[in-house]
Image: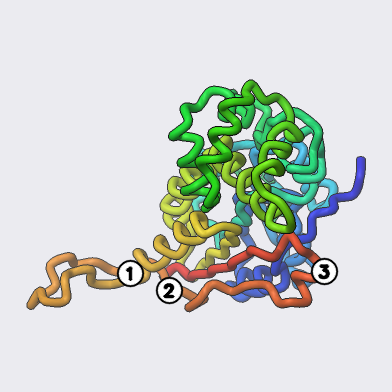
Amino acid sequence: MQAPTHIPVMADLLADILLETGGTIFLDVTIGNAGYFKKMLNLSQRDFHFYGIDLDEEALKRAKRNLRYSNLSLKCANNLNLSHIAKEWGVEKFDGICGDFGLSWDQLLDSSRGFSYKSTGALDMRFSIEQDTNAADLVNNLPKDELIGIFKDIGQERFSRRIANEIISLRPLETCDQLTDIVRKIYRGKSVEKCLSRIYMSLRVTVNKELEAIDQLLPAALDLLSKGGRFVFLSYNSNEDRRVKNFFQHWSKACRCKPESPVCTCDRTPRLKILTKKAITPSKKEIINNPMSRAAKLRAAQKL
Ligand SMILES: C[S@@+](CC[C@H](N)C(=O)[O-])C[C@H]1O[C@@H](n2cnc3c(N)ncnc32)[C@H](O)[C@@H]1O
């Protein structure tokens, strides 16, 4: 088996934020190759108990090999079932919970997974092989308007309609290169790569229901965070980042009554303190060393 190639994004910062809690029980809801826990082990001598979730069985194998730490509990599952998973582990509270949404380099580079527009493999894009629907099912069966919606709303692609029309006239599509050729016919020059990234990202997010997972994960994670415990989440597109930002804002506000209301009637106590006023992005140096970090946005918050 090859060594993992994924470089964890903003790992020093994430590890510092979690280590500052002084805690020992940490959960990574998208553990991948366990790059963040590895960084925490490099920076601290504490006796940790690490917990990790990933939908991808292969990622969990890499996490185990990469971390080589005995106090590690892993679960191959969708993180939207977090409450249930924590119950199975018998954990009531975590001192820190992190998540790094999207996919890893190792997944992108594995041509058989169909995540890359450079792949010649099947149009798959499932994080878990247990899942029924893959990307080929979507492009071959969805009505035109739904395909347009995916490319436009998730991918923010301006030629969504043209791309969807072309897909429909040429389907069934089976492989990534067939889809890539369609986009290459529409776009010329440098912008084609950016468009391909948007189209592939939007299909992947839809196949794996990634936005729905974040919506379910965040409230469950808040209930499982100890007082003073911290969240750190990394997003790679505006839909993901908006969800984290809105969630943090929602739970950091005290009174939610209208400004014109004379007395407070909502009786609401804030549950989070935002630690990152604005999302933090990687340095230029990090982006040069690790181009996959380019779009990353990190947000952190602390439970009150
Ligand atoms: C960007 S990678 C994480 C990389 C990790 N930070 C590291 O250092 O190696 C995201 C991981 O999340 C997993 N994933 C995506 N959606 C998931 C979900 N809903 N539940 C569990 N795992 C998920 C993917 O399989 C992938 O391994």
Check mark 2 vs ligand 1: CB closer than 8 Å? yes or no: no
Q: Indicate the position of residue 43 as horizontal and vertical percent values.
A: 77, 72
Q: Would you say 271 lies left or right of 217 here?
A: left
Question: Quick check: can you spot residue 87?
Answer: no
Residue at horizontal 48%, vertical 70%? 302
Is 82 or 172 nearer to us in this picture? 172
**Image-quadrant location for residue 54:** top right
| Residue under the image location 17 percent in, 69 percent down | 257
User: To which quarter of the image does residue 245 belong?
Assistant: bottom left
* Residue 298 or residue 36, whichever sits in front: 298
Mark 1 against mark 3, which lies toward the viewer? 3
Tell me the amino acid under the disc marked 3: Asn
Q: CA distance from mark 1 to mark 3?
A: 39 Å
Earlier-in-chain disc, 1 versus 3: 1
Q: Which residue is mark 3?
A: 289
Mark 1 is on which residue type?
Answer: Pro
Q: Regarding mark 2 in the picture, which secondary structure is present there? A: strand
> Residue 73, percent across and down?
68, 45
Q: Residues within 10 Å of mark 2 (few under 14, many from 20)?
A: some
Q: Where is 160 relative to 166, above or below?
A: below
Horizontal side of 252 relative to 93 (left or right) equals left
Residue at the image position 56 percent from the left and 27 percent from the top: 168
Would you name the residue on which mark 1 appears? 270
Q: Are marks 1 and 3 in contact (CB under 8 Å)?
A: no
Name the disc covering residue 3, or none: none
Q: Are marks 2 and 1 in contact (CB under 8 Å)?
A: yes
Q: CA distance from mark 3 to mark 2?
A: 32 Å
**What is the crowding at mark 1: few (fewer than 14 residues within 10 Å), some, or many (at least 20)?**
some
Q: Which residue is mark 2?
A: 273
